[in-house]
Image (spheres, rainbow, N blue to C red):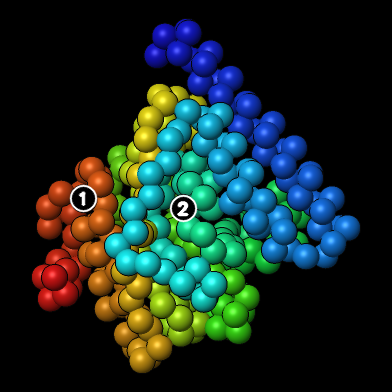
Amino acid sequence: MSPLRFAINLTRFLACMVWSGVWITAALVILLLTWRPQIPLTMARTIWGPGILWLAGGTLECRLDEEIDWDQPHIFVCNHQSMLDIPSAFVALRAPLRFVAKRSLERIPFLGWYMRATGMVFVERGNPVEARRSVALAGQRVREGHGSLLVFPEGTRSKDGKIHAFKKGPFALALEAGVPLVPVAIEGSRHVMHPRGLGGHPGTIVVRVGRPIPTSDLDPSDRGALARLTRAKMIELHRSIGGPSTHDDHLDGDAAQARRGHA
């Protein structure tokens, strides 16, 4: 990377951090004044997210396979490439959107305060009992109509852009909530901002939102099959928008079978 490109990328990254700090501070002030978490969530979709994408040099393109009732609760499941996935999701998914995040983020000043105050769901990955309790509580909140959730089932950012193995917690959450699960694929964010934060070039980020998968008639024993089906559908969506997952050899055998069975 040339010194000029490094300087440009560093400036963009720092500008995103400053913008986030200003916005989170404003959101916390509004929360203290109104006690209405919906207002900061709306600001994230209409102010923070578009601002971050502009500062990073990203242009967002969203494609819907089917019109979605954004006022109804859903669980959106998305692949993870970059720090830009979160603002992209806020803008593309026009719902009162909350995230499932690792517990360590709750301890970060300002960010953790904002996430906790707006009802984000924290999961302690190293503690299975606590994780199950968090999943049950999150499922109950979604079922009762407290907005939609976005989950990154890979658990971390993909460094090669491919969709990797899924953790099963998000699908236990979907079954607990009993609301439709929506596969979402994102491509291009890793080129605009690399997985580690620095590096990248201005470009287009494409988000494709698939058809909702009903879960109300499923039970906990269906968790594995639901995870495999969702992963197969996400890989199909990802391929359609230029993702690097192009063949069945990026699926395990069960996922490939699920994809063929639901084509």
Is 59 displayed left or right of 124 in the figure? left
Quadrant in which residue 187 is drawn: top left
Quarter the N terminus occupies: top left
Question: Distance between the Cα atoms at labels 2 and 1?
Answer: 19 Å
Cβ atoms at labels 2 and 1 below 8 Å apart = no
Q: Nearer the viewer, mark 2 or mark 1?
A: 2
Which residue appears farthest toward the top when viewing the image? 3
Any mark on residue 136, and which?
none
The type of residue carrying mark 1 is Arg
Residue occupying the point 60% across, 84% down: 144
Circle 2 sits in a helix, a strand or a loop, which is it?
A: helix
Q: Position of residue 117 (x, y in %)?
A: 75, 62
Q: Position of residue 207 (x, y in %)?
A: 37, 50
Quarter the C terminus occupies: bottom left
Q: Position of residue 95 (x, y in %)?
A: 54, 64
Seen from the viewer's position, the closer of residues 147 and 124 is 147
Find disc 1 in the rendering and name its residue.
239
Find disc 2 in the rendering and name its residue.
92
The type of residue carrying mark 2 is Ala
Circle 1 sits in a helix, a strand or a loop, which is it?
A: helix
Name which of mark 2 and mark 1 comes first in the sequence.
2
Q: Position of residue 259 (x, y in %)?
A: 16, 69
